[in-house]
Image: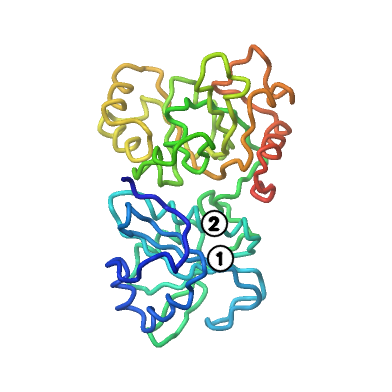
Amino acid sequence: MARQLRLTRFRDVSLDDPFFDSLKAGYNGFSNWFAGKANEPLYIVADGHKISGMIYLKREDGPVTDVAPPLPDRAWLKVGTLKIEPAGTKLGERAIKKIVDTALVTGADGIYVTVFEVHQDLITLFERYGFVHAGTKTTDNGVEQVYLRSLTEHDDDPLKRYPFIRAAGQKFWLLAIYPEYHTRLLPDSILNNEPQDIIEDVSHTNTIHKVYISGLALQRMRPGDPVIFYRTSDRAGQARYRSVVTSVCVVEEVRRKSDFRGIDAYLAYTRPRSVFSEAELREKYVTSDRMGVAKLTYNAAFTRRVIRQTLLDEGILTERQRPDLVELPRADFDRLLELGEVNAGIVVD
């Protein structure tokens, strides 16, 4: 069984699991704290009954006064506990995505986390996605560093402002993806009729960063361009109701085959974030001279899936138009996000 990130409650998790040994050793009173949270929700990463990750998130309103200097009077999402055991995947990125998504859903103005300096890998992960050092927190367990991320002020660096999208001056795209690759690449965009067990514990599932490989003219896209994914029909003749728009991403970069110095460089770039096996990746490299590789960030899943019939009714697509790679007017891009009930605040100009 694959590892999966799922929502549960403290009371339904056994504190005797070996996963918690380091937390009990590192934090005085951890067991009592855990028991006191019995009815509260938390996310765990589990392979069957074996726990390998935990994320506890808590909304806090008002100034945060137990850190120095105090955090201002705002709506905060606190990352109360985050531990992810590495297993060769990118679950850390998946945790960041879950944290930011939760902050947006709960209407937080910012996120903060406390972490001991010894956890440098975790600090580096937070800093990569826009968290900045903001002070310290002193407890009986020692001095922790405080890192925060504003959700109202946006950095010029696309990763530091993730998942927010700067639309001004960009082009907008509709990009097709086949059903057999869709949910493996974009797990939060799973359709209601797809089984959860197809979301495997592999790097491309757990990452914020995705690699899309195609013979399409992907070089038309530029860094910063928003891309809406269009999952093609899984049944012949039923595209009107089985083809759906599911998610929005942003282009990080686009490469042609000639941009790689050889197959090894190509594999090192594509293998961790592509849905294709190494054998499939090798075949594409050998057999396709027109191959393009787009690296994207996975910014948001649509809350409501938008079917092809709606795109026709809205005049976004025409009957004869192939939706492989279609440039969209800004108004159509905005309308698709509206139809998909994507958080309106995700697009900033």
Instruction: Name the residue tied to disc 2.
Output: 100
Q: Compared to 19, does 154 lie above or below?
A: above
Amino acid type, residue under disc 1 in the picture = Ile
SS class of the residue under badge 1?
A: strand
- 2 and 1 marks in contact (CB < 8 Å): yes
Left or right: residue 316 compared with residue 275: right
Label 1, residues with CA under 10 Å away: few <14, some 14-19, many ≥20: many
Left or right: residue 332 compared with residue 160: right
State the image coordinates of residue 248 (x, y, percent, origin top left). Answer: 57, 39
How far apart, in angstroms, are the residues tagged by discs 2 and 1?
8 Å
Task: Name the residue located 47 percent from the left edge and 60 percent from the top edge.
Answer: 8
Label 2, residues with CA under 10 Å away: few <14, some 14-19, many ≥20: many
State the image coordinates of residue 217 (x, y, percent, origin top left). Answer: 50, 21
Amino acid type, residue under disc 2 in the picture = Val
Q: Compared to 33, does 101 lie above or below?
A: above
* Quarter occupied by residue 50: bottom left
Mark sitting earlier along the chain (2/1): 2
State the image coordinates of residue 329 (x, y, percent, origin top left). Answer: 70, 29
The numbered mark at residue 111 is 1
Front in this rendered view, residue 16 or 266: 16
Q: Compared to 343, does 289 lie above or below?
A: above
